[in-house]
């Protein structure tokens, strides 16, 4: 009876049969051969036939060859890129460029207008998305189906806003704030030509120069009264989060020497400016920006719960039940910085006042001012209405101090009164310290 090997070999081609027989013979030789070290010694002495040496080398390499073949088979059976896990969210970042709008950005990113409207509805209380500037960034978080789940607006290192989808499909927002630290510096200069050019050369920004203009505009005409050789000294604080500048700055003290005239202004902790003797430089605010009193239909409430969703939806202002067409007045003198149309806040105006004060007027029927315009206290700036998402005509009025909304009905606002008695001594000590800084910096500049 033929052996199983001979039966199998009968069906193989001649070359394959010879290769198989050679492997069988080599395997048998390897099994019966003594210890490899003795073989190596015998081969070096010329005692080991070349065929046996070749067989031994092939046998030693056989496991490595099999291992390599197995690895190649495993690699070929796997996909080139593993699919993402269902719970992994994808991130996409966009840097704001000049001329960008939220609508254009969403369109380029492939997001629907419905998603944009949902985020704008969440932003109604904040209105952070109405002004997108170069240097701001948007970061989008997507699920594995490429659906928008969250969006972060990076304003600066100390201010980010997170818009996140809730279980009901709508979006909510959360401000991520880091107050950072304020670092002061002293800037001095001598006026040669215009105050603006001299101040820019000394390192003041356009916002710094505008603040100085506002503080002294009642006592000095900057285009006519300033004489060549007049000196100015400014203490400015810049905001940092860690080592990163946020771009926020504030004037804390300024002195201007023009002929025999000496003007000074120093910032108090309450946000108001006083001269070196503690007398107020600010004009009074109006508590209510209307010609007469109207019923308050909704109070300021930063923790108000939405009646439908049950989520916290801040009400950052006070609502007055005014009929459409009621004149709206500027609460104090300042500069108009925004006149916008928002799908939820409606037509609104924003005014920057002295120091750290800002006011907003929402849901207007008509605006009577334009961006960049200077306005006086009590000046008509618009007509109340029902624009945006509202249930009826009214004026929504907001007061912001240091970029944070406060209750305009009870906030401490400038009333053109002297500095409070209980903080007068501390304020005057701080003024003396800043004046010393100014004089030292002036001496250093003059020595250069």
Image (tube, helix red, strand yellow):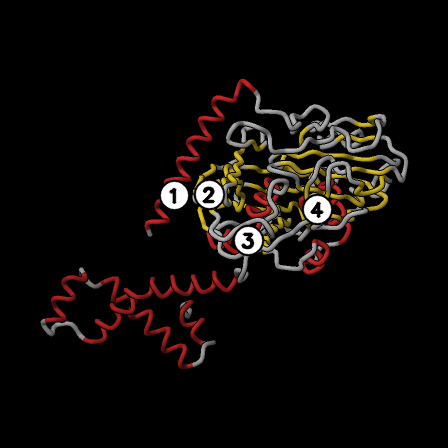
Q: How much space separates mark 4 and mark 3, taking CA atoms?
A: 18 Å
Q: How much space separates mark 1 and mark 3, taking CA atoms?
A: 20 Å
Mark 2 vs mark 4: in front? 2
Question: Which type of secondary structure does the marked residue at label 2 adopt?
Answer: strand
In the drawing, does residue 89 fall left or right of residue 292? left
Asked if marks 4 and 3 touch (Cβ < 8 Å), the reply is no
Q: How much space separates mark 1 and mark 4, taking CA atoms?
A: 34 Å
Q: Nearer the viewer, residue 191 or 26?
A: 191
Q: Is residue 389 above or below residue 286?
A: below
Q: Which residue is mark 2?
A: 233
Mark 2, Cα crowd under 10 Å, few <14 / some 14-19 / many 20+, is: many
Mark 4, Cα crowd under 10 Å, few <14 / some 14-19 / many 20+, is: some
Q: Which residue is mark 1?
A: 441
Q: Nearer the viewer, residue 145 or 184?
A: 184
Can residue 315 be seen at all in this image of the molecule?
no
Q: Which residue is mark 4?
A: 374
Q: Nearer the viewer, residue 48 or 411?
A: 411
Question: Which type of secondary structure does the marked residue at label 4 adopt?
Answer: strand
Asked if marks 1 and 2 touch (Cβ < 8 Å), the reply is yes
Q: Which residue is mark 3?
A: 196
Q: How much space separates mark 1 and mark 2, taking CA atoms?
A: 9 Å
Q: Please report whichever mark, 1 or 4, sits nearer to the chain's N-terminal start.
A: 4
Question: Which type of secondary structure does the marked residue at label 3 adopt?
Answer: helix
Q: How much space separates mark 2 and mark 4, taking CA atoms?
A: 26 Å
Q: Quadrant of the N terminus?
A: bottom left
Mark 3, Cα crowd under 10 Å, few <14 / some 14-19 / many 20+, is: some
């Amino acid at each position: 009876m033929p052996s199983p090997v001979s039966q199998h070999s009968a069906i193989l081609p001649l070359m394959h049969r010879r290769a198989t027989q050679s492997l069988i013979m080599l395997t048998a030789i390897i099994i019966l051969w003594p210890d490899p070290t003795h073989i190596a010694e015998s081969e070096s002495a010329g005692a080991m036939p070349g065929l046996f040496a070749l067989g031994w080398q092939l046998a030693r390499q056989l496991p490595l060859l099999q291992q390599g073949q197995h690895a190649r088979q495993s690699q070929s059976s796997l996909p080139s890129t593993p699919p993402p896990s269902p719970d992994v969210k994808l991130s996409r970042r966009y840097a704001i460029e000049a001329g960008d709008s939220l609508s254009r950005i969403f369109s380029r990113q492939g997001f629907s207008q419905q998603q944009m409207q949902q985020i704008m509805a969440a932003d109604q209380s904040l209105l952070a998305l109405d002004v997108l500037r170069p240097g701001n960034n948007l970061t989008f978080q997507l699920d594995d189906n490429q659906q928008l789940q969250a969006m972060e607006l990076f304003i600066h290192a100390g201010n980010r806003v997170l818009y996140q989808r809730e279980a009901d499909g709508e979006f909510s927002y959360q401000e991520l704030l880091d107050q950072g630290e304020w670092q002061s510096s002293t800037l001095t200069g001598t006026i040669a030509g215009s105050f603006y050019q001299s101040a820019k050369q000394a390192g003041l920004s356009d916002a710094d120069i505008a603040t100085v203009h506002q503080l002294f505009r009642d006592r000095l005409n900057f285009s006519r009264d300033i004489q060549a050789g007049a000196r100015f000294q400014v203490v400015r604080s810049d905001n940092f989060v860690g080592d990163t500048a946020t771009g926020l700055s504030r004037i804390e003290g300024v002195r201007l020497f023009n002929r025999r005239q000496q003007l000074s202004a120093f910032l108090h902790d309450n946000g108001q400016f006083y001269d070196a003797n503690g007398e107020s430089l600010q004009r009074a605010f109006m508590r209510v920006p209307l010609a007469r009193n109207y019923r308050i239909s909704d109070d300021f409430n930063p923790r108000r719960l939405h009646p439908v969703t049950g989520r916290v939806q801040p009400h950052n202002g006070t609502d007055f039940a005014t009929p459409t067409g009621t004149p709206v007045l500027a609460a104090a003198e300042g500069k108009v910085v925004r006149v916008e149309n928002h799908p939820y806040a409606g037509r609104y105006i924003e005014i920057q006042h002295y120091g750290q004060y800002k006011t907003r007027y929402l849901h207007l029927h008509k605006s009577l001012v334009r961006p960049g315009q200077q306005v006086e206290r009590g000046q008509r700036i618009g007509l109340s209405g029902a624009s945006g998402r509202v249930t009826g005509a009214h004026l929504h009025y907001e007061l912001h101090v240091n970029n944070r909304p406060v209750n305009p009905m009870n906030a401490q606002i400038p009333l053109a009164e002297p500095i409070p008695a209980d903080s007068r001594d501390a304020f005057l000590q701080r003024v003396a310290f800043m004046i010393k800084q100014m004089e030292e910096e002036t001496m250093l500049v003059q020595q250069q």
